[in-house]
Image (spheres, rainbow, N blue to C red):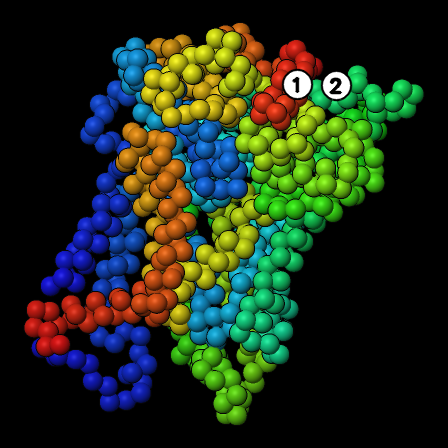
Amino acid sequence: MPCGLFHTAYQTDERIYKSIWVKAWLVAFGLFLLLLPLFVRDYVLYISNMIYIFVVGAIGLNILTGFTGQISIGHGAFMAVGAYASAILTTKLGLPFWISLPCAGFFAAFTGMIFGIPSLRIKGLYLAIATLAAQFIIEYTIIHWERLTNGITGMSVPSPSLFGFVFDTDKKFYYLLLGFAALAVITGRNLFRTRVGRAFIAIRDRDISAELIGVDIFKYKLLAFGISSFYAGVAGSLWGHYTNVITPEHFTIVLSIDYLAMIIVGGLGSILGTVLGVIFMILIPEFLTTVAVLLKSTFGEITTLISAIKGLVFGLTIVLFLLFEPDGLSEIWRRTRDYWNLWPFSYR
Amino acid sequence: MERRTICILILLWVAAFIFCPLGNSGAYAAETIKIGAVVDLTGPTNDIGVPYAQGIADYFDKINKEGGIKGRMIEYFPIDYGYKLPQAMAAYKRLATEHNVIALIGWGTGDSKVRIPLVSKDKIPQLTTFALEQTEPHTPYNFAHMISYEHQIMGMLQYAKDHPLEKGRKVRVAYVYSDAEYGRAPIRYLKERNFAEKLGLELVDEQIISQTATEAVSQALTLKKAKPDYAIVVLTPKPASVFVKDAKKVGLEATIMGFSFLGDYSLLKLLGEAGKGLIVAAPCSYGHETDVAGIKKIWDYNKKYHPERKVIDLQYVYGWLYGMILEEAIKKAGDNLTGEGLKNALETCKNFETDGISRPITFTPTDHRGSYEFKLSIANPEKGTFEPLSDWIKVEK
C-alpha cells in the first residue's frame, strides 16, 4: 500500500486525476448527482439548482479575484447584464435560449472588460471602488432604461426548449444546470493549466515581476475581467430562464457581496473551494430557516430572532474564516482528506 | 478521532437534509390544516412586516386554543424572506413541496406577483396585501382582502378634488412613491389611465424615494417648487418618515396624504410634531378603536396570552383579518379541504362580516378583490393615534 504520491515528472504533477481513486470517487459522485432527482423532493432540487447556478457565477469571480488578484464588487451587476441580455434576446428578438445564452455571456464579458479598463492603473481598494461604481451604474441603467428592460417591474423570461422538449420543471432544469455547472468546473480547472491561466496567477503573485518576464499585463487583466464576466453572464442567463422572472431587485450590491463571501469562505484561488463555498453559503440560511420552522410553535420572539440571526451568522462566518482559515473550506477539505488517506495508521 | 466524528456528523446531517422530508414532524397528527406564509421579518419592510406576521400567527393560535376548526388544528409555517426574491422562491418551494400547505399568505408585491403563475399551477390559494390586476383571468388563485393601492389613491384624489384649498383653480396634486414594486405599480396604473387629469386635477410633480433612503431633501425641494396642494405618498413607514420630516424641514406646505401602510403608530412617534395634519387611508379599523367588536376581541386575546403587548398596530389587524377570512373559507370548504376546494370556498364568500374590523368582504369567481371601501384618518401627534376624518368611502371599480 503506498503511503503517498510521488511524482517524477512535471507532467504527472499537473494531472487533475492524480490517482485512480480520485477518478473513481469522481465517477461515483457524478453518478450520485445524476440519480439524485429520482429520490428527492422539489425543494431539494430547487436548492441544488441554485447551487449549480451560483457555482457558475462564483467560479467566474474566483478566476478574477482568487486567481488574478483583481477584487470586484460588481459581479452581481455583470450577472444582471447576462440575465437581461438573454431575456431581451429571447423575448424581443425571439432567439432560442441556446443562442441567447452564449450571447449573454459575451455581452457580459464585453461590459466587464469595459469596467476592467481602470484595473491597469489602479489596484486593491481603488479597484474595488471602481467595480463598485460598475455595480451602481449597471443597476441604474437597468432601472431607468424602461423601454428595454421594463424598469423595476422586471421582465418575464420563457423557459428554454430543445426540439420541443421544454425545460419547465425543477427536475428537467436540474440536468441542464448540472451540465452547465460541470462544464464551468471543468473549464475553470483546466484554465489554470494553460498559458493564460499561468499568466493570471503570475499577475496575482507580483504584477511587476510578471511584466518583467513578459506577461502583457493590460491584456491579461482585461482577459480576466472578460472571462470572469462571461461566467457571470451565463449564470445570469440561467437564473433568468430558471425563475422565469427577473427584476433589478435580484442583482443588487448584496448579491455581489454574497459572491465575494462564497469565494472567501470556499477558498480564494481554488475551484473546489468555490464549489464548497457556494454550497456552504446557500445551505446556511436554509438550515437556519429549518431550525426556525422546527421551533415554530412559539412564533413571536424566536422566529423573529432566528431570522435576524441569519444576518449575524453570515457576517460572523466571513470574519471567522478570514481569521482562522484564510484558505477557506478547500483547505479544511484537504486536511480532512489527508487524515482519511492514511486512517487509521496516521503517523502525524 | 474528533475529526472523524465531525465528518460523520456532517455527512449524516447532509443526508438527512437531502432525503428526509421536514414537513411531517411527529408532534402533530396528519389531520392538521397546514397554512404557510412568506413574510418579511428582517428586510427593508420589516418595521411593518413583523406585526403583520404576528397578527396572522396570533389568530391561528387563538383558533387552536379554542379547539381548532371542527376539531382540526391549524399548523402555521411563517418563513422569513428578508424581502429578497431568491429567498422568497426557496420559501415558497419549501412550503409547497415540503410542508404541503393548502393556503399561502404573502407579503411583498414583487414576490407575490412572481408567485402568481406558480400558485395557479400548484393550486394553492394565495392571499396578498396588494390587489392589482386581481380580476384578470390568469390569477385564479390570488386573493386580496383589502382595497387595492390604486383604488386607495383614486379615493384620495377624489377627496382632494372635493376639498380644494383655493376656489377657481384646479387642485394641484403630486405623487411621492417608493422605488419598490408596491410603489411603482399603482402609480403606473393610474398614470397610464390619466386618472388625475380625468378627474379635473392637475398633476404637477412626482418624486421617487428609495426604499432604503436616509434623506429626501432634494426630492422635497423639487416638490416644493411645484407647489402641490396635496402630496399623495405611497411609502412604507421607514421611507415615509424620512420624506415627511424633510418635507417639513424645507417648508413644503402641501397636505400629505398617505396610503394604508402609513397608518402606523411608530411612524407618528418618529415624526413628532411634523406628523400634524397627515391624512392616512385606512382599509380597516385601528387597534385603538376598542369600541369596534372585532378590535375588542383582539385585545381580549392579547390581554390573556400576551399581556406585555401594549400597542396593536394596523398591520397586526391586517394579519388578524387574513386569519378570519381563511377560517371562514376553511369552514365553508368542509371536507373538501384542498387548495382547490379552499379557492372555491373563498369565491363563495359574500358579505362576510368581520366584526366591524373592515367592511364586509366579498369574493366572486371573477373578482378577487375583497373590498372597495376605505376611510380617511388624520394624525393626532399629541395622542399618538389617528382620528377619523371621513366615513367609509366606496371607490368605483
Q: In terms of secondary structure, where does tag 1 sit?
A: strand
Structural crowding at the residue carrying mark 1, measured as other residues with C-alpha within 10 Å and reported as few (<14), some (14–19) or many (≥20): many
Does the CB distance between marks 2 and 1 fall below 8 Å? Answer: yes
Q: Which mark is residue B224?
A: none
Earlier in the chain: of badge 2 and badge 1, it is 2
Residue at the spot of label 1: B376
Toward the viewer: A95 or A141? Answer: A141
Q: Amino acid at mark 1?
A: Leu
In the rendered image, the residue lying farthest to the left is A345
Residue under label 2, please give it. B159
For the image, the number of numbered tags is 2
- Residue drawn at x 70%, y 25% as measured from the top left: B277
Residue A8's x, y, as percent? 24, 89
Chain containing mark 2? B
Q: Is residue B173 left or right of residue B324?
A: right
Residue B297 lies, in percent from the top left, at 42, 12
Label 2 vs label 1: CA separation? 9 Å
Whether residue A273 is visible to the viewer of this picture, yes or no, is no
Say what amino acid the circle numbered 2 marks: Tyr
Kindly identify the residue that appears in the image at 59 percent across and 30 percent down: B268
Determine crowd level at label 2: few under 14, some 14-19, many 20+ residues with C-alpha closer than 10 A.
Answer: some
Q: Is residue A9 above or below residue B379?
A: below
Quadrant hosting residue A273 = bottom left
Quadrant in the picture for residue A281? bottom left
Left or right: B85 in relation to A307:
right
Residue at 55% from the left image edge and 28% from the top image edge: B265
Instruction: From this view, report whether residue A122 is shown above or below residue A112.
Output: below
| View extreme (right): residue | B168
Q: Position of residue B78 (x, y in %)?
A: 38, 32
In the depicted view, which residue is nearer to us: B325 or B239? Answer: B239
Left/right placement of residue B280 relative to residue A223 reads right
Q: For residue A8, say whether it is visible.
A: yes
